[in-house]
Structure formats: structure tokens, C-alpha cells
């Protein structure tokens, strides 16, 4: 292997609360009707302290030769306004040439699956303005929600100036290939190596795992034994917090991993550097398949999830006719948060009863919100 690209997704959902419509409700709802912002704020403050420690650790790793990219979700960036110290910590990363920030959807939604992609394009533009305002950067690499891949959006992303894409390297997309190259498409595409990413994300602290303990030298040896140009690792930043709390050796791993790679002749690259260094390899399935983290079935595998998606599409069409109304911006903002990917995933819980209860709750919220939209247009 010639190089490694590490991208870390940083996301804290703006979770809906348990809700039941009350008779007599009318007018434009506020965020607090559907979301428990006190609880969201409390969880954010707790996690932000952990993120600050991790950011310091990543900076140490950079000083030892590391290069990293961050996929900061729109909901997380919005919450960062509550903690100027954390925001400043990410801003310092933005001033470092060894760090790249990626573009994303502003509401962490699945809007790239809608029949009409105008909402997706709007989300991409909203996110671009948000990250410009908060971090003073303009992303050139794009990571869709839950590293979702669909060929439909690539023309839009190319027109908006993106030059690289990171997506899930699922089995249906790889079709026998290994995700160890830059792949040819409208945009040069890096595909996540699922197994090695999840070694870091899920299994690192598992003492019963056969790979435990995962020290930098061992992981670097695994990578060095592979043939290919570029290995792409993508994992949730919060997973590092989990390993840290479990008193694992994640801090030593992150701190010294760049040196372990360098001693084996392997470079660390940002996504844009990888896309410009290596000749793209053609992968026919990129034009015919779509995928998402943990599989499309996990996001849209049951009737409730599919119905929720159709309801969002219908409400988006109804809402788009209200652009001249005074309450349009407030309604659009709430609607954005009702599209978060976690809402879909939680309706496909391993516990069928829990998934059903959550579906009932989300449809209660959505029905009340649609009532507000219809009243606004009346």
C-alpha cells in the first residue's frame, strides 16, 4: 500500500423528543415543540469536552507527520456555536495544511434520494456558507450523509466545484474489487474500507477480539501487506471518545500511528491529495449502484422508513410553494431537522417494538408539522 487517507465523521444528532399532537394547536410551531433542546445542549456540553481532548491528541499526531480530514455534520456545526472554545479548536485545524474539511448536507439528511434534487443542492449550499462563516474554509471534497453514494448527485457536486468524493465501499458497489484505489467517476471517488475502519471504530476496545490489542505497528503491518494505491478509513469521531473512556490505548495509537506508517514507506494523505496523486481506476458499478453506511436496507428497509421518506418528499413540495410567506424560513428550518438520517435508522431498530414506537412518534411530529404547512398555505 502506498498511502492512507483517514476521514473522521463528527456528528451529534438533533434528536426529536417524544411527542403527541395536542388538540387546539395552531400556527407556526417552534423548534421546542418537536426537539428537547435542553437535553441536546446537555449532551453536547458533555461530549464537547471529550472532543477538545481528542483534538489536542490529533494535533500531536499531526506534529508527528499525520494528515487527517474531518466530516463535520451540519447539526454538529450548529451546536458548536454553543462552545466557542471547541469551535476555535476546529478553526485551528483549518489553518493547518495537514487537515482537510469536507462538504456535507446541512441537515444530515437523505435528500440525495429524493426524486427532485433541488433540496439536496440547497442543503449543500447552506452547509458551504455555514462552514465558511464558522471555520473560514471552502471544502473541495464531499461526503454525503452516512457516506451515502448515488451517482445522481455527481453532476451537481462537480458544478459546485467539488473535486473529490468519499463514499461507502459496500459489497454491491465493489463487486469483487478492493477499495484501495481512487476510482474514476464524474468526481474522483475514494471508497471506505469497511473492515479496517470498523477495527478502529468498533473493535478497538474489545478484549475478546482476536486483533486485540491493536497497536500502531500491527495495524501498519496489516496495511503494508495490502496491494493498492490508497486505503481510505472513515469512522465516527465519537467512537474514539468511547475507546478513551474504556481506558484503551487509543491515545497512544493516534499519537504514534503516523510514525508506524512512515517507517513502512506509507504516506498519509488528505482526500484532495489522494485524488490528485493517483490515476483513477474504472469501477463500472459506480454508474449503476447506490449504497449507504450499513446498507440501504438499514435506512429504507421497512414500510415505515419508506413512508416517512415519501411524506418528506410531499411536504417538501408543499413547502416549496410558500417561499413568499413570512413564516417560510422558520418552517424550512424545522423541516430540515426532521430529515436527519438518525430518524430513519432508529425506525429499523433490532428491537421491533422500539422501532415501531419510534415510527409512531416521528409520524406524530410529521403530521403536526404538515398541518402547520397546510395552514400557512391556506
Image (cartoon, grey):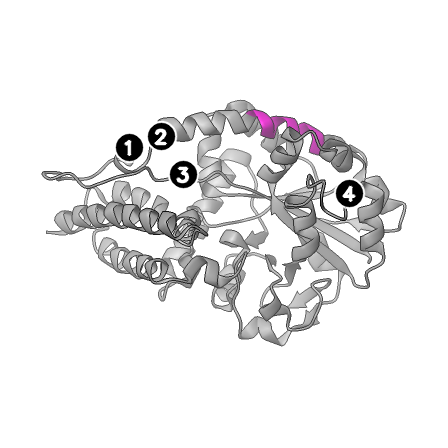
Magenta stretch, main secondary structure, is helix
233 and 377: which is toward the camera:
233
**Mark 2 touching mark 1, by CB under 8 A?**
yes
Question: Does the segment drawn in magenta span residue 225?
Answer: no
In the rendered structure, find residue 32 and report the number of the disc placed on it. Answer: 1
345 and 318: which is toward the camera:
345
**Looking at the image, is mark 3 or mark 1 earlier in the sequence?**
3
Q: Name the spot of residue 341 as percent of width and height, x first.
A: 43, 50
Q: Circle 3 sits on which residue?
A: 14
**Looking at the image, is mark 4 or mark 2 earlier in the sequence?**
2
**Looking at the image, is mark 2 or mark 3 earlier in the sequence?**
3
**Looking at the image, is mark 2 or mark 1 earlier in the sequence?**
1
Q: Name the spot of residue 124 as percent of width and height, x first.
A: 45, 51
**Mark 2 touching mark 3, by CB under 8 A?**
no
**Looking at the image, is mark 3 or mark 4 earlier in the sequence?**
3
Alpha carbon separation for disc pair 4 and 2:
38 Å
Question: Does the segment drawn in magenta span residue 53?
Answer: yes
Q: Name the spot of residue 41 as percent of width and height, x first.
A: 42, 27
Q: Nearer the viewer, mark 1 or mark 4?
A: 4
**In the figure, is residue 219 to the left or right of 161?**
right
Element marked by disc 3: loop
Question: How many residues crowd around disc 1 within 10 Å: few (fewer than 14), some, or many (20 or more)?
Answer: few
Examine the rendering and report whether any part of residue 185 can be seen.
no
Q: Circle 2 sits on which residue?
A: 37
292 shown above or below 13: below
* Quadrant housing residue 61: top right
Q: Quadrant of the N terminus?
A: bottom right
Element marked by disc 4: loop
The magenta-colored residue range is 49-58
Amino acid at each position: 500500500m502506498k498511502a492512507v487517507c483517514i476521514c473522521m465523521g463528527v456528528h451529534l444528532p438533533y434528536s426529536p423528543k417524544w411527542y403527541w399532537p395536542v388538540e387546539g394547536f395552531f400556527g407556526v410551531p417552534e423548534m421546542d415543540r418537536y426537539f428537547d433542546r435542553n437535553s441536546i445542549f446537555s449532551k453536547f456540553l458533555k461530549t464537547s469536552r471529550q472532543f477538545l481532548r481528542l483534538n489536542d491528541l490529533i494535533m500531536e499526531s499531526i506534529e508527528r507527520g499525520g494528515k487527517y480530514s474531518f466530516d463535520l455534520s451540519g447539526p454538529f456545526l450548529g451546536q458548536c456555536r454553543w462552545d466557542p472554545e471547541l469551535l476555535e479548536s476546529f478553526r485551528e485545524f483549518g489553518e493547518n495544511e495537514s487537515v482537510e474539511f469536507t462538504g456535507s448536507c446541512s441537515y444530515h439528511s437523505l435528500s440525495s434520494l429524493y426524486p427532485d434534487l433541488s433540496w439536496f443542492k440547497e442543503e449543500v449550499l447552506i452547509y458551504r456558507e455555514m462552514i465558511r462563516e464558522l471555520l473560514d474554509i471552502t471544502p473541495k471534497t464531499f461526503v454525503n450523509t452516512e457516506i451515502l453514494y448515488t451517482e445522481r448527485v455527481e453532476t451537481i457536486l462537480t458544478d459546485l466545484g467539488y473535486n473529490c468524493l468519499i463514499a461507502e465501499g459496500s459489497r454491491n458497489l465493489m463487486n469483487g474489487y478492493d477499495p484501495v484505489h481512487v476510482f474514476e467517476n464524474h468526481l474522483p471517488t475514494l471508497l471506505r474500507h469497511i473492515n479496517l475502519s470498523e477495527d478502529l471504530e468498533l473493535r478497538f476496545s474489545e478484549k475478546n477480539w482476536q486483533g486485540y490489542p491493536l497497536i500502531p505497528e500491527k495495524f501498519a503491518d496489516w496495511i503494508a501487506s495490502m496491494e493498492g494505491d490508497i486505503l481510505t478509513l472513515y469512522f465516527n469521531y465519537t467512537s474514539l471518545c468511547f475507546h478513551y473512556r474504556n481506558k484503551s490505548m487509543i491515545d497512544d495509537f493516534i499519537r504514534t500511528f503516523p510514525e508506524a506508517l512512515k517507517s513502512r514507506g506509507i504516506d498519509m494523505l488528505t482526500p484532495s491529495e489522494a485524488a490528485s496523486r493517483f490515476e483513477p481506476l474504472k469501477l463500472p458499478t459506480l454508474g449503476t449502484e447506490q449504497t449507504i453506511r450499513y446498507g440501504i436496507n438499514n435506512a429504507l428497509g421497512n414500510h415505515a422508513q419508506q413512508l416517512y421518506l415519501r411524506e418528506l418528499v410531499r411536504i417538501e413540495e408543499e413547502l416549496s410553494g410558500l417561499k413568499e410567506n413570512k413564516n417560510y424560513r422558520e418552517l424550512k428550518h424545522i423541516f430540515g431537522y426532521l430529515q436527519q438520517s438518525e430518524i430513519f435508522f432508529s425506525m429499523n431498530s433490532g428491537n421491533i417494538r422500539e422501532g415501531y414506537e419510534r415510527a409512531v412518534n416521528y409520524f406524530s411530529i410529521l403530521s403536526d408539522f404538515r398541518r402547520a404547512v397546510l395552514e400557512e398555505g391556506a
